[in-house]
Amino acid sequence: MSLPRELNNELYLVLLAVATLLTAGWIFVANKEFDIMCNFLDPLEYRIPDETFIGMAIAAALTILLFTARNPLWFGVSYSVYMLLSVLGWKRVQDSTKRTAAYRW
């Protein structure tokens, strides 16, 4: 299946490539930040959590949002699911931070 060569389709592909590069950069920076944070909290005993799966899940969700942007109904459904997962992820980070702080002190 091939799309016709139109500027809109080409820009969509460029946007997909940029989203992929930003996702890879975000995963790299997030892992470095976790290294710094974990070394500060407890350099000897706290294992660094692997957040690569979460980064890939966010990238997948944003890619789905990108491709559903043309249809308001599907974009609304996708965005609602993305926000629900984002809230659940934030709760996970809060719980992990509380456990780490309780473990440290």
Image (cartoon, helix red, strand yellow):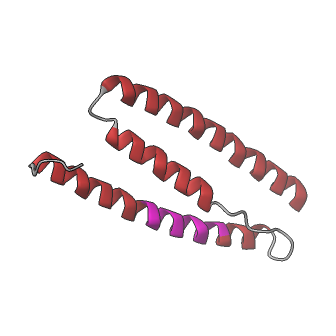
**In the displayed structure, would residue 21 be above or below residue 7?**
below
Q: Residue at x 37, y 65 (%)?
A: 21
Residue 47 left/right relative to 92: right
| Residue 22 at least partly seen | yes
Q: Which residue occupies the extreme left position in the image?
A: 6
Residue found at the far front of this picture: 1
Tell me the quarter of the picture where residue 34 sits: bottom right
Q: Nearer the viewer, residue 43 or 6?
A: 6
Count of marks overlaid on the render: 0
Image coordinates for residue 39, horizontal then vertical, percent? 74, 73
Residue 43 sits in quarter: bottom right
Characterize the magenta stretch by its predominant secondary structure.
helix
Q: Position of residue 22 (x, y in %)?
A: 39, 61
Please tell me which residue is depicted at 68% across the width and 67% down the height of the picture: 37
In the image, farthest residue toward the top: 73
Q: Quadrant of the C terminus?
A: bottom right
Q: Is residue 60 left or right of residue 7?
A: right
Q: Which residues are magenta?
A: 23-34
105 vs 42, left or right, is right
Residue lying farthest bottom? 44
Image location of residue 3, percent across then percent down: 18, 48
In magenta segment, residue 28? yes
In the depicted structure, whether residue 11 falls above or below residue 29: above
Residue at image coords 51%, 37% = 82
The answer, for residue 105, to whether it is visible in the render is: no
Q: Is residue 40 magenta?
A: no
Say which residue appears at 69% left-offset and 48% top-offset: 93
